[in-house]
Amino acid sequence: PPLIITIDGPGASGKSSVARRIAQALEVPYVSSGLLYRGVAYQVLRYGVNPDDEAAILGLLEAHPVRLVPNTHGNRVLANGEDLTPHLHTAEVDAVVSAVARHPRVRAYVNARLREVPPPFVVEGRDMGTAVFPHAPYKFYLTASPAVRARRRARERADDVAAIEKMLRLRDERDAKQSKPAEDAQVIDTSELTLDQVVGAIMRYLPA
Ligand code: C5P
């Protein structure tokens, strides 16, 4: 089968840092599905579309298709040639993205974009090993306690740790339906591990 490595897990579990490092080690692109959902959410906010209105979101995506540009070091999300990436990791997007991502046709749109990417690649998200790439030969699911995740995220956001933890728990709840480990995924609790240790643990499962 084509080399696809899926890394799933809740927000701030370390997925994107880990996925990037694995991709760099293997010299293959890294693909962030969450960034695509964030791109859709950003457009919803910008154009004043109701996040509960699935048809309106699909209409918006038809008028302004959102594209993912994956590479080894980071991903960009574009719409009409405009780079949305700098706007996607904000508290405003955090607050609305789960509502946008719960619509089946929005998920189908994002999944179609992801399946256009030619393997090999490392892809991270919530349901990469379960729904999107069920035949991937290497699957991982990262977990960490909400407190640990909030502390990690606090290094990237202006808000205080308590507010961040509250938002993470809310997103966990809203994302619960599509965020679980595949039966054949290796589950790694990263609470007590450094980034290097998580990368090392994953590399041991991969072909040399
Ligand atoms: O991974 P990240 O936290 O950037 O993802 C942002 C949001 O996108 C998640 O909270 C979730 O609502 C949505 N998402 C999803 N399925 C994925 C990846 C992300 O629903 N595979």
Image (spheres, rainbow, N blue to C red):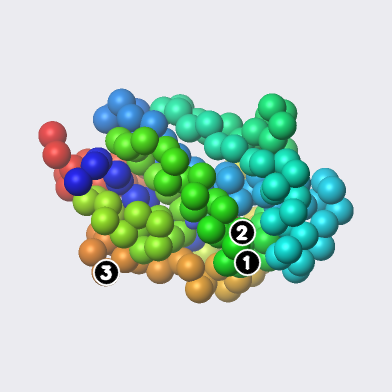
Q: Quadrant of the C terminus?
A: top left
Q: Nearer the viewer, mark 1 or mark 3?
A: 1
Q: Quadrant of residue 97?
A: bottom right
Residue 100: x %, y % from top left: 67, 61
Q: Quadrant of residue 184?
A: bottom left
Quadrant containing ligand 1 reads: bottom right
Q: Amino acid at mark 1?
A: His
Task: Please report contact status of discs 3 and 2: CB closer than 8 Å, yes or no.
Answer: no
Count neighbours of disc 1 (C-alpha within 10 A) and say few if under 14, some if 14 to 19, many if 20 or more: some
Q: CA distance from mark 3 to mark 2?
A: 25 Å
Pinpoint residue 78: horizontal percent, then vertical percent.
65, 33
Residue at the image position 45 percent from the left and 28 percent from the top: 71
Q: Which mark, by number, is residue 103?
A: 1
Q: In the rendered structure, which amino acid carries the disc numbered 2?
A: Val
Q: Secondary structure at mark 1?
A: loop
According to the picture, the residue beneath numbered tag 2 turns out to be 106
Residue 78 vs 186, above or below: the answer is: above
